[in-house]
Structure formats: structure tokens, C-alpha cells
Amino acid sequence: MEYEPAEYQKLQIRQYAPRSIRETAEGKYWRRFKAPIVAKQFGAVSHIDFCPTYPFNLAVTASTRVILYNGLAPAVVGRTISRFKDIAYSGCFRSDGKLVVAGGQDGIVQVFDANSRSVLRQFKAHKRPTRVARFGEDKLHVLSGSDDVTARWWDVSSGTQVLRLDGHRDYVRAAAASPTSPDTWATGGYDHTVKLWDVRAGGAPVLSLDHGAPVEDVAFFLSGSLAVTAGGNYLCVWDLLGASPSGGSGSGSGGRLLKRLDNFQKTVTCVRLSPLAGPDSVAAPRMLAGSLDGHVKIFELDSFRVTAASKYPSPVLSLGLSPDCRLLAVGLADGSLTVRKHARPKALAGAPGMPPPTKTRYQPRLTAANFRYFIRGQNSKAAETDYRVRKGRQAKLQPYDKMLRQFRYRDALDSALSSRQPEVVASVLEELAARGGLGGALGGRDAEGLRGLLRHLVRYISEPRYTRLLSNVGQRLLDVYSGVVGSSPAVDRLLGALRNRLAEELGVQDQLAALAGALEPLLAASLAGAV
Amino acid sequence: MVGGGILSRRPGTLSGDGKLLLCPCGRLVHIYSAVTGERVGVLAGHTDEVTGVVLDPENDDQAYSCGLDSTVRLWDYRSGEELRRLVVRDPVKYMVIQKELGVAYFSVQMREGGGRVMLYNMRTGKFSGNALKTRTAGPLALSAFGSLAATIDRHSLFVWRTGTDIYQPLNLKHTKPYTCLALSADDSLIAAGDVSGRILLWRSFEHCVPSALRDREAGGGKVHAAVQPPLTTLHWHAHPVGALTFSPDGTYLLSGGYEGVLVMWQVESNNRNYLPRLGAPLVGLHPSPADPAKYVVRQADNVVRVVNAATMKVEVSVVGLQPPPAALLPPPAGVAGGGAAVLAPAAPVGGSSAAAATPLGYGSGGGGVLVLSCENAQLQFYDIARDRHLKLLQVAPRNTVSTTESAHPGPAGAAAGSPPDTPLPPFVSYLALSADGSVMATVDVRPDAGPYGSTESCLKFWDSSASGSRSGSGSGSGPEGAPAPFALNTRVDEPHRDVVTSLAYHPCRHLAVTTGGFGAESEFKVWVQERRRPEAAAAAGGGGRRRGGGAVVTSWRCRSTGGYKGLPLAAAAFSADGSVLAVAAGARVTLWDAESNALAAVLPAATPATAAAGPAPLAQLAFVPGTPFLAAASPSCLAVYNILTAAVHWCLPLNAMSISADAAYGLLSVAVPAPAAPPPAAAAAPPATPAPAAAAAAAGDDGGAAAAAAPAPAAPATAGKGAARQQQQQQQQRPPPPPPPSCHVVVFDPRDATPRYHCHVPGAAHVHIAHLQAPSASVAAPAGGGDGCSPLLILRDNRHYSLAALAGTKAVLDAALPQGPLERDQSLSAFEAAFGRPTVHANGTAAPMDVDGAAAAMTTVGGRPRWAELFDAPSHVLPPPAALASAFLTTLLTTSSDA
């Protein structure tokens, strides 16, 4: 604050009150999934599955094919499995990533080699479209669910059906294996029920839960004792081990509804759980759910509150988060696949297939043969006992500060505009006004020089914090250049845009005034009633 | 006691050894140390303004001063003794001394108008018969070689050869008026600046200057130079050139002007080197006699700097009381609100609360720190007791920028004639300090910036950094490098919709009130300090600034707003105990409960509405502590309300510029302008008052005594005191064709409308008054009971201040103003850090100028010779041995003679 003579003082950038609520670490983390790669598919992206092993490839099922993308280069179209006669469903990796299983509209469940894409097995027993197919944890079995209201348990090595699971009375659309017990499966169907199966026990469900709406997706929590089901416009979290209050509709005990989450406007189509997602400071498992209303919401698992949400341009049919939380893939009904990349993926040290950490490079001993010998020690810190000679620090000036110091007002304004920070532009404009240099900075511009200024005006003139300043600047600008309007089509276009923007803003103001007028008697009446 | 004054208007000089700086200031010559910037002495004796100081070329330890009192005096400035006095008939404006011939040239302003350059032979003590007649007394220049002298007179530059007479000067004419001139040491160059910013440079012109001796054969007629010497024009300055000087070797030309940039021209190549952003227009440049690299730079903002031209660095700055910002000069241009109240020095802090020992962290003395708003949104902290600048605080950090090409302010430096589209620099319009001095609130305004521009104001709250919690970002450049006294806590942009019209701080709580707004949207806002734990602050993410780990974070927010019937609100004041908030709404006064925002009462307008317009809106409010009275001032009326009866107690048709309440004695002081009518005293007396006050006013008026307080019923008791102070006053213009504006300060007892005391302030169109509260007096004297008055600070618009006190209350004054030496923090110099601190003398430190027996005795007792302090610095900062030798010998001689 202290003023020192003969020293240039930097321009104080104006600070405005924070515009919104404070950004949480959680929101910041999910916003750091940046640079979306949008890949257009031939049909709606019905299923996305990440391979659990490095490099976390993803299988995307859309239309009549399953496309395998490399997890390291999701922008490149990977291998395409197109051995389907009709629409493919539910392309899924085996846990080692070597095989892929997929169902189909024709009811055939096929097992492919992930590398050569050749068909290894075909399970032909379902009579109706098979919407769901999953590998078991033992890598040797496949569970499939079909619209013929059955689920079947297949042996991959022999290619035969081991078990037929009967119990659903409508389409089976979801299936999930318990992470703790390889023989326990949950399937969900359009008969509003989720049934738990023990494939060792045979073809009768162990537990049946009533979701209340056609079940679209089901997922186990990492502990294996909780499960979440998606269907209708809500999610249900179930405690599978706790005692059911109603005694249970099926055989066995358990199945207590823990929580019902009504956070969506339309049908929830997919739900996933991630053990690592979230910022490092509050590392905890997260639940992700996507819905036909185009929202993907992230829940924390303590009180099931939404910690972050993002909107997509069309209904969300499927989503996936890579195990290292590097890629977030979302499949939409309009056939586009959006893959967002996080800058800081989680380190999965023990992940299978992970390459070993790179060794530190051999540092040769510094000799005078190397030029670094002569610049050694430049970064070493002074010891406590050393006497420090204070170096005259060169103030680092921003470009607009340099221009202001040289009284080049027009260039200062230009460099502030090119910084694309409206508060910088506002500060520079105010400083120019205080110096009496606004006329010089605004005048004498050609069409090219005017465009940046006009673009800024069009963009920010209706923001309340800049309106007063920018409307004054706009008035002066029109005064200066009213004589040459029409000589440059680009400038004229921007002036037209400015006029439209102002007309739009005035319309909004009119509506708001009308609304305030309508509200006033109501408020007065309510106040009178209260008194 | 008086202080302030303008240091930089008249040319000063460095002493022969370059260690002292002599600056004329009013009737005094102040002597500052050119090393530390501290004031070390004063030369008193002139009875009118001193216009210049020049060293005696024969003896470096003596200096001549000339003044408007028509005398030239020779001083031994080390002892402060007047050695000789020479009486000239007319006021002397400038003087130069030629060493070899022993003559001096005086530029004299004749009383009947016009100027003369007179030649005085110092050896014979006679004036020469001839004098050069000029229109106004212009500055003089003399080459160091001594064979040529020059002066300027509007469009003419006269150069003549020195001799026993001024004969046939060469006239170098120019189409534009000259402003300054300089002669190089070897007579080969002469430079002159004009109002358009050009510097005219004549080389090898010497042969064109006629001979000094009268050519008898030619018949004595005037010989005009046949050829004009060749002329070079240097043009860098966009505004009038303010000062010019050549370096002693003639290689460089230094110039300065309104831009505040010191420009160093290499004469041969015209290459320039700059020292920019000095902060104010340069009005004078003087080379140092001791060190060829050093120059004295005088600035229009009352700052004198010593600049090293070799490193282009400012070495020392001597800062006086800074001039008020141009936007605050009456009439307040473009700034709505109370014109009088915006001249906003805060009441001296710390006086009212005995607990606050060091309110601003300066020294041991608490009271007497004046906070002033100055140019470019700065605040100056000034110690009125010691008449000493403490610190500058930049409220809105920005660079000083002289206005662009459109502004051409006159030589006076005022921006009065500037076109409307040149904006005035921002300034602080209001400031208030909390009672304990720990929090300061300021309102700074950026005035209207041309068409479609708008005035913007900003409310800021500052925390005192006396606790040292904040490690200063900018190391101090003040006199002792102390950190800035306040650190910014909260900033509120646009606290009110249009303008802020007043600011008041609660006397015991951290709560402030601003009023402002425009038209029906006028409102007052109550701001409160919020205290939060740091973690809560981090979670909520407020605007509070963290002050140290684990400390409570404070921030300010608006608690409530209020208004009264859409009337414009122009002033606010808290009662002494803080329970009542008074807000002036139009001509009425509204009383509020500051805690609950409840409207307690409305006091009616003091004067009934006239037919044409309503009663004038109130501009100032002040509670009189200890009494149930509230004073309200408007441009046409001074009213005192009784809060108990909620009615007007009395009212006088006075135009009160400034009002102040005396907490110790329950009195009310009012400053009113003197009307222009011929008998000023009679007109000054309000209708309700009888003659005694008028008589006292007339008695105190003679000779320009600024502060002569006279009890109304008694005789003018302080006449003697006023006469004693009279010598220290700044003069008013001697022959006043229109009587200069003056002011009266009247002290009322609020219980009745009879004035108790009165004093007259001549030569000031506008004053601001504030009572100093001595802690002891506030305890001792019962409110309104005792017969007396607290000392009153009267600050004039030219930033000259005086303290008025009753006779016999010197003790009170001393109690209010600690006079002791300021405690300086004992920082280690680089020399001391390397070699240890030298042992202190047995009885403390001796003043450098103190050449008496005690100091001489100490040379043997303390074991440290007097001359040792000459070398008490690292070798690279010591002056050259040639300069040091004479001072060294002097100290040796003095010591031996004293011993």
C-alpha cells in the first residue's frame, strides 16, 4: 500500500463479489473431467463396459456392433466386432480382458476373443432378444438374461447351458454379479422385481425385492451387502443382509430398502459404482447414475447426496468410469459417445497388467565435459547461516501494464481485450477513464480493431456488474464511429448483434418489471394478513 | 503553536558539505538533514515570507536569505544566528551572488508594480545606480564561472555580463512566455523553458553579449546585437517547463515540469534519461555544492527531494503537509455532498481515550496525529505536535498521471481551468477512525470521467497494523521506513447508488454509518464488523482477509439500511455514548437507535421554509458531549437542538464551514467565513451577540495574528501570546487591493447563543477546526462547568495549521501534545550490522548541531571524539574527502576552541 516514488504501480484488477456459492472440492474434481471426445456411433449407445485390467479398454455397444476402444487412446476407433445379424446388446469384458461376451436381438449370446474378434462360442437357447450377458468372476461361466423372461447360466469351456433361472414374469433387463461371492447374482426385470440367485442352489431365487418400477439396471456395492437398483425415475438402495420388515416376499431373509433416491425427472437407465472416484481429500466410493433426462449425477454413499451433476444434450443410456478414474464415458440415445478425460488419474499400484514404474534415468557424473557442469548449483538453496544478498526483483508486468506505463492507451485496451478476462477489461477501462485516456483508446480504430471491442460489448454488456461501465463505453463508441457505420460489414454485423442483445435485455427487464408488479399486491396482501 | 506551511515553493539549497537542506517555509527557513530527512533546525527572524536561500560563496557555513519583508539576512545556519541584515526598499523575490566581483543581484518586486533587477556591491555596501526594469520580478541565473547573469521577463530573456553595473543586456526574444532559465557553468550554454514545454538552448552566444563596460567612444548609445546566437529547441515536455539546471560540468541539462518527470538531457547528443513518477509537478531544481551528482528537486505537492542523478534514485524526501486534492477545493467540482465536510482531516486520534497509548504505532506520544486526504487518493499521517510528516497511505493504489494534452494548468498548478473532460484524480472524500484508532474507514471517489462517465466511490475498512501481524508487502519509504499504518480489510464498491455524503464511526463499538444515494433513493447504511474463527471463514468463503494463523478474522458487512421519507441524507453523527444516531434528512434531523434501527425522534427544521425554496439542507451534525445538545449546520443556519425536549434550542444565521464539539468543556466551536463588508468584526458578530466579541475580534486582527483567542467577557488575554506567535505566521499578501478572505472561529456554549471565545484567521478562505482532547483535561474538568476550552486545531485551506488555546493553558496544550523527542526504532544500519553498534554516549545522544560545552566535554569523557560521527558510515556512502576535509577541520577547531 505504501507509495514509493518512481516505481510503477501495477494496475489493481477489480475484484467482484463471488458470483455463486463456493465451489466444493468435489465439484472441482468432477469438473476436471475435461476435453470431451465425442464419437458418433450408428445407433444409440446401449452399453459401455470398462475392462478391469490395464490399460482399461472400453467396450461400447451400439447398433449392430461392439467397438473396443483402447483406454489410452479413446479418440482412436478401436477394433469393431460386427458379427451380429441384428442389434447387439451388452458387450462386456471378462475380468482379464481377453474375452468379450455380448447378447443380441436374435437371442444368441456370443463370446469373442478381444484381440482377434473371432467368435469363440455361441449360446443358442434364448428365444427372444438377450439384453444382458455377463461373465462370472470365475471366468468360466456366463449369465445371460433375455426377454423370454428367463436367465441362463452357461459354461464357457463346454459351451453348454448349466442352469436355467426361472422366476421373472417379464423381460430380464439387468444382471450383476456380487463382488464378494462369485456364485451370487442379481437380476432385474420389467416385472418390477430384483431377484437374487445362488447358482449353486439351483433355479430358484434366493431373494426377491420389489423395486416398484421396471428395473433398468442393478449394481452391487463394493461390500457386497448392499445393492442399488435403477428403474422408473428413481434409484433404490437395498440392504441385502438386513431383515426385511415385511418378512420378505421370497424365500430367505433380508432385503430391506435403505433409501429411495428421487433425483431424476425421467427413467434412470444406468448406475455404476466406483471405489476411488472423488477428490483425494475426501476419497470414498461414489455412485454414478444416468437418466433419460440427460443428467449424470454423482452420489456420495454416506447420506446419498448429489455431490456433482452434469447435463448431456440427449438422453443418457449408458455410462462407465474407468477403474483408475481417468475416463468417464457416457453413451447417449442420439448415438454419440462422450469420453472425458481427467488430468490426474488415480494411481492403481496393484492393478493387474499395470506396467512397472519406470526406472529413474541414469545420471552421469557431472564433469567439465558436460555443459551442466558449468551451471551446477544455480538452484541450490542458501543455508541458514549464509548471508543473503537481496536481489533487486524485477516486477513482472502484464502486457496491459506495460502499455499503460508507456501511455499507449489503445494498445493497453487491446491487450486487455485479448486477455479475455472481463474484470481486466473493466479495470483497464476504469483506469483509462481516470487518466482521461478513454477517448484516445476508443478512437482511431479500424474495423479490425473495433471488432474485439464490440465483441466484448456484445458479450458482457448485459452482465449487471459491467453494464454501467460498458454502456457508457458503448455510448462513446457510437459517438465516435457513428459517421462510418456501414463501411465494414463485419462491424455492422456486430453492431446489429449489440442492438439485438440490448433489445433482448430490455425485454427481460420488461418481463421482470411486469412480474414484480404482479407480485407486489400478493406480497402486500400476505404481509397485511400476517400483521 | 503553528505548523505546516509550504516548503517547496521557494528555492532552497543544500549546505556546503551537502548534509543539510535549507528550505524557506513561510517566515522561517527550515533546516533538514539531507541524510535522514529529519528537521534539525530553524532560522527565524524574517517578518514576512522568505523567498530564497543562497549559500554565501565566501563561506560555506553561512547563507543569505531574502524575503518579502524587504530584507536580506546573512545567517550562520549551523548556530541559527543572524549575522548581518541588509534592508532593500522593496520585497526581494530572487537573488544571486557573484563571488569574484563581490556583487549580488536582487530581483525585486516593486510596491507600485513592475520589477527591477538591482545590483548590490557587497564590498562597498552600495546599490548600483542602474537597474534593469522588468514587468515582474523574474528568476535570476548566474553562471558558476561568474561572467554572465540572466533573467527572464515574460517574452524576453536578458543576458548581461557581470560587472559593476548592469549595462546593455542582450535580449533573446521568444513568442511564448518563458518560465525558467539556466546558465551553464562555463558560460557557453543558456537554456530557457517556455509554457509550451519547449526548452530553448543557445550555444556559443557569449560573443553576442555586449561588453559590461560602457563604451565611451561609441557615445553611450544602446548597441543591439547584430546577429542572434544560434538556437536549438528541445521539446519533450508536454506541459510548461517548471525548472531547468545544468550539471556542474555542463554536460547534462536537467529539466522538470508538470509531468512530474525529471529529464536528464545529454547536451551534445540530446539523449534523454528519465526519473519518472515523482508524484507531482516539479517546480525547482538546484545542484548540490558538494556532490556533483546530487540535485535538490522541489515539487508542487510540498515535497523536497534530494535526487542522485548518477543512479537516478531519490535519496531523501522531505515531506510537508500535503496540499488538498484539487477535487476537494471549493467548490467541490462534480462531487455532491457537503462541501465543507469533505475537507476531511479526522479528529486527532487517541486523545479521547486514555487507554490507547499508541493509536497509530508511532512513538510514545499518543495524540496529535492528523490524517489528511491529499492528491491521488492518498492519506497523509502528520504529527501536529512535532510538525512532522509520518506516513503516506495510498488508499486507491494507482500511479500519478498528469492529465493528457488537453490540460494546461496555469503556473499556480491548480486544475481550476482544466476542460471538463479531463478527469480529476481520485481522492479520499471521507474518513473516520474508531475511538481506539484500530480501524479506519475511508471513502475514496473517482470523479466523473468525461461524457457518459460516472462518479464511482468505494468504501474501505482498514485494520491498524500496529500489532505487526501483517508483513508489509511494500517496504516503507517514509521517514523511518515503518510499515504502512493500516492494512486493507474490506472493500465495498459503490456503497450507495450515487454518491456517499457522510461517514460516521461509532464511538465505542466497531460500527460505521454511511449516508448517500440520490433523490428518493437516499439511504443510510449501517456497517458492522464480523468476527469469525478462521475455519468458519474458510468454510463460508467470505471476503475476510486472514490475519495470522489462528487469529480471529474480521470483515465488514452491511447490517441494515434505512431512510426517511425519501429525503436526501447528508450527514450523520453518533452521540458520545453511541446510543443515538443522528442523521440529517433534508433540513430535519432524524434520531435513531443505532442498535435496533428504530426511529426515535424527528427534530424539525430550524428555520421555516421560505416561499421560494425549502430550508437549506443540513450539511454537518455534531453532538456536544456531556450536554443534551446537538448542533446542526447548514449553509444558511447554525442550529442547536435540545435532545431532551426534541426542539430547537437556539439558532443563528451563520454559514458554518466546520463545527467541532469540545468534549472536555461541553463547548461548540464554529468556523464561519468573514463577510466582505469593510468592518469585518462588526459583521462577523452574529445578531444575537453583543459587542464584546466584536471588540475582541478587532483586537486580535492586527498584524495578521492567526490565532488570538480572547475570552469574550474578559480582556484579550492572549495578546502577548499572539504577538509571540506572530513571527511564525505565514504572511498574507501585503497590499491587499481586495481584502483577502478570512475566517472567524467562534466558540459557543451550547446552552445559550452567546459566544464565549473568538479568534480570527486571516488569509484563509476555508478552515477546518477540531478540538484536541487532552486525556487529563477530560477527566478533570466537569462538562460545561469549568471556565475554559480545549486547544483548537485550525487547519486552513492552504494546509497551514495553528493551534489556538487560552492564555495560561499551556499546560493543557502540553498535556495534549507530547513534545518529547520521537522514539525512533533502533534499526541496525549495514555498518552497525557488520561492525557492531557503537557505544552510546554517557548521557544519551547529542544533537548534531549542538556545539556547546557539554558536547565538547564528552569528547574526553565518553572516549569518542566528535568528529567520529562524521565517519560513522560505510566508506562508499561517505562524501568525497575534499568535502569532508573542511567539515572535519571545523569540528576539530570547534572542539579545541570550546575546550
Image (cartoon, coloured by chain):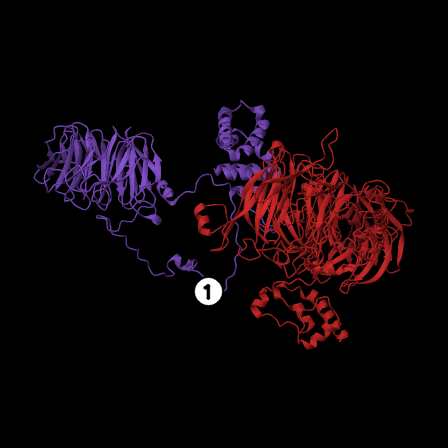
Chain colours: A purple, B red
| Count of residue discs | 1
On screen, residue A42 above or below B350:
above
Q: Position of B892 compared to B134: left or right?
A: left
The part of the image, by quadrant, that contains residue A326 is top left
Q: Which chain carries label 1?
A: A
Report x, y in % for residue B725: 80, 56
Circle 1 Cα neighbour tier, 10 Å, few/some/many (<14 / 14–19 / ≥20): few
Could you say which is closer to the camera, residue A117 or residue B502?
Answer: B502
Q: What element carries label 1?
A: loop
Q: Which residue is drawn at 81% across and 42% down?
A: B688
Identified by mark 1, the residue type is Glu
The part of the image, by quadrant, that contains residue B880 is bottom right
On screen, residue A413 above or below B169:
above
The part of the image, by quadrant, that contains residue B678 is top right
Could you say which is closer to the camera, residue B843 or residue B608?
Answer: B608
Q: Position of B14 compared to A511: left or right?
A: right
Report x, y in % for residue B151: 79, 48
Could you say which is closer to the camera, residue A337 or residue B607?
Answer: B607
Q: Is residue B803 visible?
A: yes
Q: Mark 1 points at which residue?
A: A384
Report x, y in % for residue A453: 52, 32
Report x, y in % for residue B770: 71, 50
Q: Position of B47 compared to A514: left or right?
A: right
Q: Can residue B424 be seen in this view?
A: no
Could you say which is closer to the camera, residue A146 or residue A102?
Answer: A146
